[in-house]
Amino acid sequence: MSNIRKTSLENQHWYFKAAGENGWKSATVPGCVHTDLLEHGMIPDPFVGKNELDLQWIDKQDWEYQTTLSFSSDWLQEERIELTFEGLDTYASVYVNGEKVLQADNMFRSWKVDVKSHLKVGENQLLVYFQSPIHHDIGKPDQLGYNLPADNDHSEDGGVGKKKLSVFARKAPYHYGWDWGPRFVTSGIWKGVYIEAWSGAKLMDVHMQQQAVSFEKAEITAAIEIEATKETEIKLVISDQHVLNISKLCKLTKGFQVIKVPILIKNPQLWWSNGLGKPYLYCFQVDLKLNEQIQSTRVVKTGLRSLRLVREDDRNGQSFYFELNGVPVFAKGANHIPNDSFQTRTTKESYEHEIATAAASNMNMLRVWGGGIYEYDIFYELCDEYGMLVWQDFMFACSMYPGDLAFIHNVKQEAIDNVKRLRNYACIALWCGNNEMDAAWSEFEEEAGWGWKQRYNGSQREEIWKGYDEVFHHLLPSVVEEYDLNTDYWPSSPMKELSYNKDQHATFDTVEKGDIHYWDVWHGLKPIEAYKEKVGRFMSEYGFQSFPEKKTVFTYAKEGDLALESDVMLHHQKNGAGNRLIKNYMEMYYKEPKDFSSFLHLSHILQADAIKSAVEAHRLNMPYCMGTLYWQLNDCWPVASWSSMDYYGRWKALQYVIKDRFKTTALIVDQNEDSLSLYAVSDQLQDQEAQLLLHVYDLNGQLMHQETSDVFVKQNTSNTIYESDIKSLGVVGKTNNVVLFAQLTVDGKVIDSVEHVMVKPKDLLWRDPKIQLSYVDGGIELESQSFAMNVWLEVDKEGCFEDNNFSLIPGIKKYIAFTDSVNGNIHFTKTQDITDVKVVSMYDLIVQ
Ligand code: BMA
């Protein structure tokens, strides 16, 4: 028990109203005005139909939130009484008993203010006044003399014409709209708020700096920040859940100080990313004792590991990979966006569902993309627990920002706050300055980029780049260096290297260095096969859209809206060309879908097939390529998007394909014009002696060709284990009627198996597979009479199957378990009873 008095202001009565109006109504804190209005039935559901467009008035309005605080005289006798807002969205004035105590202007900062002199015994009023972010910033483009580029800012939907205001507010960029997100410019107390009263001394922060970590020892420095109201003697006690127990007597001076305590842990249990080992967590506790009594306590839960980004010249260019505890890690994962347009209503359970999904899908890295928020702590806690590395962007994306001193100062404080908050998490692998700004502006290569700089005259261009250079090449790296020295910084994603010449900028073609966002498939309309040609050192973005499943579509659309180009379907598609692109790509690869429902379903298959091609190309090029993060894991509302899991956490076909293709050892088929290769890609840290079995069947299940061989699968790399020309498989002239089945076994245990068809799905000789389904041991068993592709299981219960969107070869039965995903509990070891499972396959979706 510490002597610090702390009271959270979250569990008390808050009220809100539009400024200048009467009638306070109850409010939820943390929360935001949109969700409070919704709670009172004052607005319709923002996600339904085109309601978004009717709710744009909310951000043109100022809002007030208030509550009452009661204090006893004991509280008021303490020397310090500090009010902390962990987050205010965004332009907020805070008043205590009518007196202004704080002016906030950055959603991403936390604010602490001493309010002792404003408080009285008994009831006190706390009021937060939010100025409309739109009114606050509307004059800024004119002041600047030009509009800054911000292509995703849906200013016109917001009724402010071409004025891109998102860049002026240090507020989640996606609130202003994105190519997968609606425009809801929120206001509110979006994170925790509390009051602490104390006297003497208090721990302000503890940073467990991991100086050097190896299998033998962990050398750590606990950097302990303390604030003291007077000179005093204290004792610091540092312990963990094992034997660590260090005491240190210290003399404090009045004010702020940092005390550093070295810690040595012998033979530490290391933290490993998912797939490589256990993500072991230490629980360090620091107690500050005054007169042998605990005055203040901080707990830091973290994993011990060495982690760095390795960029070294090699014969192919320059490496780009993460090394964890000395092991080069192939990063498998996705880009994460906020889980809700109103992020305050994302629950712990939905975060757990997301991270458990990532782990169950054999991922080991997520990128917290720069157009959203620095995530809540729970996100990183879960990443630590599940062994999920985090590539952390600073919150700047696809825009250029102002570079005036006030803005830069604000960004500096934001960076310090967030680096300090997140630096203890074991998962933090990289700090990255921004998303796509270096490539989009392309300062040193006139012809490249997104055509932004051409919109400005010489001095404007200079001014914009100067601001960029200051923030991303000076300010942010220096904050990382000062506050989180052991984590690497990368100025922009994607980028080749910081060279200050034309070699700096990544393009779709610069595959030898840095990271790449490859969008020539999808935005660039290239065929899916192009994924194979453009494999870089680290693929940090590439993506392919699909619609959400029908159940999800029905949360925003009515039966009558179910048409590709209906107003409502188009409204829930924020990428202008999106619906058409899906249709065009679909025509390239598949037969015509039977009806609209089949079209929705086929869009999942298309997306899954596309991303599968990309992931396989990336993995089989290991160790040249050492990372693949597809765009995007999740959604912030129900929408057609690049996500593999929709707003409700429902797995699309892609999620299952990812789970399968990200297996620790994966068997990959690579077919070219007239040859075929098989790869065993291993992320395992031991070599494996394996057996490869290869069968070719006709679509009725008749075996046409078989081979077996012993193969050696070298650890942590991609191995070519089979090469053949198609001729020798005996399938020439019959490729539309065959399926290749390959299986890798180690000591009799199947490590991976794949089914591969040799022509585009639309060219296959389709016949009714007549799938039979039976319920066994709580799971289900399936078999088919002829080859079935994209077999899809559906049940009227939220949860995930162990596998889905799979193939069935006649004669080979498949057993599938189901897990409900309550509390993110995605475990397939113990299956749960299900009944009424519906099964369809590609055959049922297409016109014969
Ligand atoms: C990348 C991302 C996002 C965007 C996605 C799809 O550019 O960084 O900005 O949503 O592509 O267009």
Image (cartoon, rainbow, N blue to C red):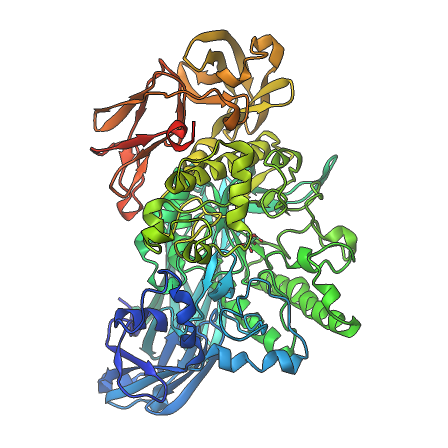
Determine the residue positioned at 60% across, 48% down: 523
Say if 371 sits above or below 21 in the image: above
Task: Tell me, yes or no, if residue 37 can be seen here.
Answer: yes
Numbered marks: total: 0
Say if 271 sits above or below 44 in the image: above
Say if 764 sits above or below 59 in the image: above
Task: Tell me, yes or no, if residue 652 can be seen here.
Answer: no
Determine whether, in the image, residue 348 is placed left or right of residue 740: left
Say if 406 sits above or below 278 in the image: below
Question: Measured from the top left, where is residue 665 in percent x and y?
Answer: 48, 27
Question: Measured from the top left, where is residue 707 in percent x and y?
Answer: 51, 8
Question: Measured from the top left, where is residue 758 in percent x and y?
Answer: 54, 21
- Which quarter of the figure has residue 725? top right
- Which quarter of the figure has residue 531? top right
Determine the residue positioned at 45% across, 49% down: 564
Determine whether, in the image, residue 246 is placed left or right of residue 396: left
- Which quarter of the figure has residue 841? top left
Quadrant location of the N terminus?
A: bottom left
Question: Measured from the top left, where is residue 652 in percent x and y?
Answer: 40, 41
Determine the residue positioned at 54% across, 59% down: 370
Q: Nearer the viewer, residue 687 or 54?
A: 54
Quadrant location of the C terminus?
A: top left
